[in-house]
Image (cartoon, helix red, strand yellow):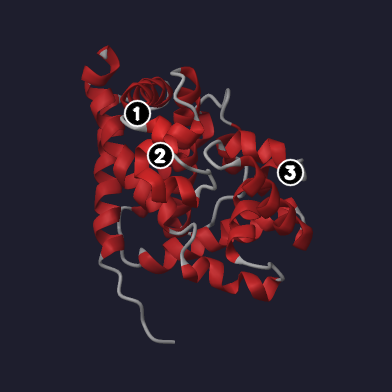
Amino acid sequence: MVARMTPIATGVQSLTEPIGYLGGRWMLHPDVLGPCREAGYPHGYAYYVAGRGGVLGDVDADVITAAFGFFEPALVRKMWNAGVAVEGAAAAAKRYGAACAQFGRARLVGFDGAARLAELAGRVAADADVTGLPLFAGWRRQPLPDDAAGRAYFLLHVLRELRGGAHLLAVVATGLGPRAAVFASGGTDSADRFGWAGPFDDLAGVSKKPAEDLTDEILTRLYSAVLTTDEVTELAGLVTAMRTHFDAYVPTDG
């Protein structure tokens, strides 16, 4: 509770929604998944699992289940095995990461805060403690795009993996568990999408608040070890401005 009341904690909390939105908006977007069949992937979900998890290497699906955390294990195994069979884990991650950068690059033309946002986000990505955060550790070791817009957007994906990993730790530590956490976030529809079987009567009234509070505390410690309070506040302002610019994007024909 103390961490939630400090100025830096407030700044970190204010990053949660826009980073979750911007850092995840690309992952299952048709612009990203659509071309995967041309590369040989059987469908977009196999590409998503192989691409996102590919930073961990050619490992057994149990490792991906452990890192993703919130998906039903049999679903992960099916999608992972189908995805890595196409071109291997490293190539899948490289392709998926390039798609992330391009997705952001196209939508951030003219956003003049990209370079500074990338500088601040890049410091967190490079210097935050990776203990217990394998996906974050894997993605921060991927090559960064050369351009400011692509780099800024890619780094928001990396910071989203930072929060996702911290949240998974909190979900486990508070005893909530992945199945209950997914249900608490979005009910039956969300649990179904993540592969969990119903009925979900045992989860009625389940709350994520203890896990969310612990997630905020973990992230506050991680961010405050790298950035000052003023820098976190500045980063939050830049991410908010990026979202406004991003949401104003209008696709052009051709």
* Residue linked to disc 1: 206
Q: Earlier in the sequence, mark 1 or mark 3?
A: 3
Q: Residue at position x 31%, y 26% from top?
A: 209
Nearest to viewer (mark 1 / mark 3):
1
Residue 13: percent from left, percent from top = 28, 32
Q: Quadrant of the N terminus?
A: top left
Q: Secondary structure at mark 2?
A: helix
Residue 122 appears left or right of 250: right
Q: Quadrant of the C terminus?
A: bottom left
Q: Secondary structure at mark 1?
A: loop
Q: Earlier in the sequence, mark 3 or mark 2?
A: 3
Amino acid residing under circle 1: Val
- Evaluate whether residue 196 shows in this view: yes
Residue 6 appears left or right of 217: left
Instruction: Say if mark 2 contacts mark 1, CB within 8 Å.
Output: yes
Q: Nearer the viewer, residue 206 or 31?
A: 206
Amino acid residing under circle 3: Gly
For the residues labelled 2 and 1, the Cα–Cα distance comes to 8 Å
Q: Earlier in the sequence, mark 2 or mark 1?
A: 2
Nearest to viewer (mark 3 / mark 2):
2
Residue 30: percent from left, percent from top = 48, 70
Residue 162 appears left or right of 52: left
* Residue linked to disc 2: 183
Residue 193 appears left or right of 227: right
Is the residue 239 above or below the residue 227 in the image? below
Is the residue 124 above or below the residue 244 in the image? above
For the residues labelled 3 and 2, the Cα–Cα distance comes to 30 Å
Amino acid residing under circle 2: Phe
Rendering quarter of residue 5: top left
Q: Nearer the viewer, residue 116 or 248?
A: 248
Q: Residues within 10 Å of mark 1 (few under 14, many from 20)?
A: few
